[in-house]
Amino acid sequence: MAQTDITAATWGRLSLLALIWGGSFLSVRVALDEIGVPSVVAHRVLWGALALWAVVLARRLPLPRDARVWGALLVMGCLNNAIPFTLLAWGQLYIETGLTAILNAATALWGVLVAAAVFADERLTPARLAGVLIGFGGVVTAIGPAALSAFDPRSLAQLAVIGATVSYALAGSWARAQLSGLSPLFSAAGMLTGGALILLPLAWMVDGPLPLDLRPETWIAVAYVSLAATALAYLLYYRILAAAGAGTLMLVTLMIPPVAILLGAAVRDEALEPRAFAGFALIALGLAVLDGRAGHALTKSRRA
């Protein structure tokens, strides 16, 4: 499967996924005001998994009997849920939202590099690398280059966020290599189950029994991050992965920061700086370069 051009359907799914995940930062931060990091991520994967299994049972889908598949799902739950969810939530407690978003957007860089190293049809072309770098520059511009001045490689919180981005990138390639034959619904349900098997005991050891007597605003945040930003989002995740590959899938992290900035301006009355619009334009340019069709059109016009 060639990974040069990105179809309109894939762009639509990427945009929807970015919109959903753009609100997850706010929801996680609201939940962290009342409960600890392990409990937040345990709630996230538990309710997300239960929602998807309800759909699996309602549709009476047959379960795979191959132990290798269940092992791959457990690894996926670790790489795509347990590790990054925990590291990102913990990092949000100690570093600025802008810097967190910039570091998280680096997932696109890691994703393209890992996919290029693993899959022959996702090779790293100059145009592909240029598109990712332009898009990442747009993220930095939109949030403000000053946010990078706070970067300190010795900071455990910042290293945690970077670790989460590497884990996400590895998960994308792992899923394509090991789970390509499964339906998106079962892949998402099995992966979240694997994450829950890891996170529920961790939350019990650190925070005690999973808290259920939460404030209404905390339950709203938990419901959004588990049902929308996890269950629904990962159905889209696996559809994009199957259609466009691991490297293209990771580009969604370039599209999340503008959504997060706009939501902050709309919901929390945060200032929307003029530089944000310049950053959005750079992100759009980077995505256009990655799309490939603009370059093909220019080449055809020159030949004509």
Image: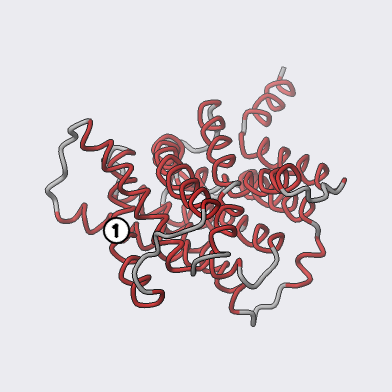
Instruction: Name the outermost residue toward the top.
Output: 304
Q: Which one is in front, 36 or 48?
A: 36
In the rendered picture of this protein, how many numbered marks are placed on residues?
Answer: 1
User: Quick check: can you spot residue 88?
Assistant: no
- Return the x and y of residue 163 as percentages of the image width and height: 52, 69
Q: As drawn, is 234 to the left or to the right of 70?
A: right
Q: Amino acid at mark 1?
A: Gly
Badge 1: residue crowd in 10 Å (few <14, some 14–19, many ≥20): many
Q: Quadrant of the N terminus?
A: top left
Q: Quadrant of residue 151?
A: bottom right
Q: As drawn, is 13 to the left or to the right of 213?
A: right
* Residue visible at 36% across and 63% down in the picture: 78
* Mark 1 lies on residue: 194
Q: As drawn, is 62 to the left or to the right of 264?
A: left
Q: Which one is in front, 299 or 273?
A: 273
What kind of element bears circle 1? helix
Q: Quadrant of the C terminus?
A: top right
Instruction: Name the outermost residue toward the bottom.
Output: 154
- Return the x and y of residue 238 as percentages of the image width and height: 39, 41
Instruction: Name the outermost residue toward the left.
Output: 65
Q: As drawn, is 230 to the left or to the right of 199?
A: right
Q: Which one is in front, 136 or 2?
A: 136
Q: Quadrant of residue 39?
A: bottom left
